[in-house]
Amino acid sequence: MTYCVGLALEQGVVLLADTRTNAGVDNIATFSKLTVIEEPGERVMAIMTAGNLAVTQAVMARITEGAGAPESDEPPMTLANAPTMFDAARLVGDAVRDVFKHDGEALQAQNYGFEASFLLAGQIKGRRLRLFQIYSAGNFIESTQDTPFLQIGENKYGKPILDRVAHYDTPLEDAVKLALISMDSTLRSNLSVGLPADLLIYRRDALAVAARRRINEDDAYFRVIREGWSAALRDAYRTMPKPPWPMG
Amino acid sequence: MTYCVGLALEQGVVLLADTRTNAGVDNIATFSKLTVIEEPGERVMAIMTAGNLAVTQAVMARITEGAGAPESDEPPMTLANAPTMFDAARLVGDAVRDVFKHDGEALQAQNYGFEASFLLAGQIKGRRLRLFQIYSAGNFIESTQDTPFLQIGENKYGKPILDRVAHYDTPLEDAVKLALISMDSTLRSNLSVGLPADLLIYRRDALAVAARRRINEDDAYFRVIREGWSAALRDAYRTMPKPPWPMG
């Protein structure tokens, strides 16, 4: 499985993706699930993927290189030339549908589900910053000020902390903390999500990536977060009062 | 859906179950998912249920009243007379298989899954305290000192805190806190889990229930836990250091 989280906030975007893929528990590997398209001053797009790796790679080939695009005299639309973020999201959705048309039946014949989902964030010069989640049916939703984060993959372990503290006006630096805490909760409880993790930070209207970082087990800051968060949870739980009821 | 958690610890058992059932989001209701069989000085058993309500109620009828038990001159085995906890767990498993035999095909014909799982805890005079999880196939596992908690239903939201701090030697009072925190995380993130919650506390070798409590929205202690935990998480997140990397 996978865990990816994206926050689209007043100040910009924070994206975090793990890198574990597995076909059963005895066949795990590391694949980056975060792809960044950057043309400084013109556009920044970043896409994170979850689901069947063959499906997501086929989709990525379509939307980054035009592989499998319908025959045409013009160069195919890709994330590098999509005129708007909405067009880019639709491009991802159409690519998923194309892959489903090509592979869906064969997968189903062997009882494999067609699973793929995507978080697409970015901004094109003169347009607004947007964050979309694209489903395996090719339809998509967008984050809002009320719900400024979206998740794909193993989303449940890391959701409670986001539900409690993620707000549209959360500063980017705090959003990085939040994303890492959410990832840590998932890593601890689910073996199918694994380090390293890929982090991307984009400041609204910058039209260039602010920071991109691969976080390993020995990343000093992530260690501080992991250990600090564990200690803080244990302390918090200890300081809660005991039940006031008679307990036998 | 449902969330039930059981901890089997050195000092005894803590069980906590929500009470929401739903058939779609527009048909929700309150059903107790915790049933207690108590014969003071002789036996205490408690069972929590998750899954298709028609299935779990049929199983409960079988194991508490003998409804649907095979014809025999002797009274049917129920939780009230099962000679050991292992027999009781097997009784639950057999009952699930009977219900599957009776209803499985009809459910499948309408594309309903056969979903049912159970946490069974208890102690019989002269025997050890045990906690079992019984699956929809009727097979079961038991908690151990290494893994002293089991969960059924929507288990992911509330698992990180248990993974971090639940140990076999956790005192019962702390285990109540833990169960409530775990429930709170689930309630906040998943609409299909709802209050009131049913709590049961059993002290090892007491052969009588130590405490049983229905926890509503306005339960003063649960409010303290919910608000205190939220505040503690927000504080903990605020006190984490900011990322030391350049961020554009």
Image (tube, coloured by chain):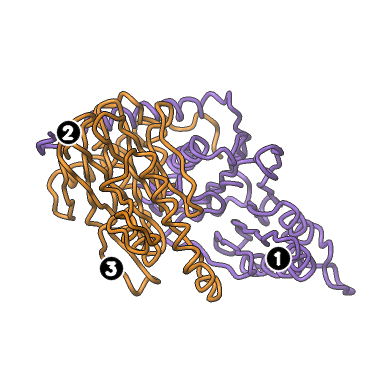
Chain colours: A orange, B purple
Q: Which chain is indicated by disc 3?
A: A
- Amino acid beneath label 1: Val
- Amino acid beneath label 3: Ala
- Amino acid beneath label 2: Pro
Between B43 and B104, the one lying in front of the other is: B104
For the C terminus of chain A, the quadrant is: top right
Structural crowding at the residue carrying mark 2, measured as other residues with C-alpha within 10 Å and reported as few (<14), some (14–19) or many (≥20): some
SS for tag 1?
Answer: helix
Image x and y of residue B126, in percent: 60, 63
Q: Is there one chain holding both mark 3 and mark 1? A: no
Disc 2 and disc 3: Cα gap in Å?
31 Å
Q: Which of labels 1 and 2 is toward the front?
A: 2
Q: Which of labels 2 and 3 is toward the front?
A: 3
Give the side of residue A58 with respect to residue B30, left or right. Answer: left
Between B103 and B215, the one lying in front of the other is: B103
Residue ID for mark 3? A29
Disc 1 and disc 2: Cα gap in Å?
51 Å
Instruction: Tell me which residue sits at (51%, 29%) in the image.
Output: B222
Judged from this view, the residue extending furthest toward the front is: A73
Give the side of residue A40 with respect to residue A73, left or right. Answer: left
Q: Which chain is indicated by disc 1?
A: B
